[in-house]
Image (cartoon, rainbow, N blue to C red):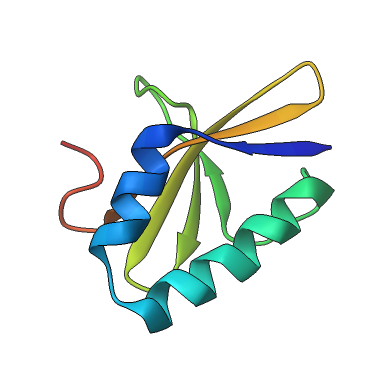
Amino acid sequence: MEVVIDDNALRDLAKITKKDAERIFSKLEILSGYPDIPNIKRLRHFDPPYRLRVGNYRVLFDVEEGVVTVYNVKHRKESYR
């Protein structure tokens, strides 16, 4: 699958520490193997409908027609607001 990172997600990544951002980028590469990835959960009544847990951060994304689009990367305290 192709992984596309939205502008909002890039802004979110720019705000966090370099070490955490590198860790998240390594996990984003793994998203191309969707759905065989641990730490992914389908969210109910929330958009985007999927989340990937990476330490204290949550990567919020959607899957449509073979494309994984990452919309947000937020700290766990802020991710579901």
**Residue at 62% over, 64% down:** 27
Residue 30 or residue 43, whichever sits in front: 30
User: Where 79 falls versus 46 (above or below)?
Assistant: below
Q: Along the horizontal axis of the image, is 78 left or right of 72?
A: left
Quadrant containing the N terminus is top right
Q: Quadrant of residue 66?
A: top right
Q: Along the horizontal axis of the image, is 57 left or right of 6?
A: left
**Residue at 35% over, 63% down:** 57
Residue 53: horizontal and vertical position, in percent? 47, 60
User: Where 28 falls versus 24 (above or below)?
Assistant: above
Residue 22 or residue 60, whichever sits in front: 22
Residue 13: horizontal and vertical position, in percent? 36, 57
Q: Along the horizontal axis of the image, is 81 left or right of 66?
A: left
Q: Quadrant of residue 75?
A: bottom left
**Residue at 51% over, 66% down:** 24
Considering every residue shown, the one lying at the far bottom of the view is 19
**Residue at 41% over, 47% down:** 10
Quadrant containing the C terminus is top left
Q: How many marks?
A: 0
Residue 44: horizontal and vertical position, in percent? 41, 26
Q: Along the horizontal axis of the image, is 38 left or right of 72?
A: right
Residue 52 or residue 17, whichever sits in front: 17
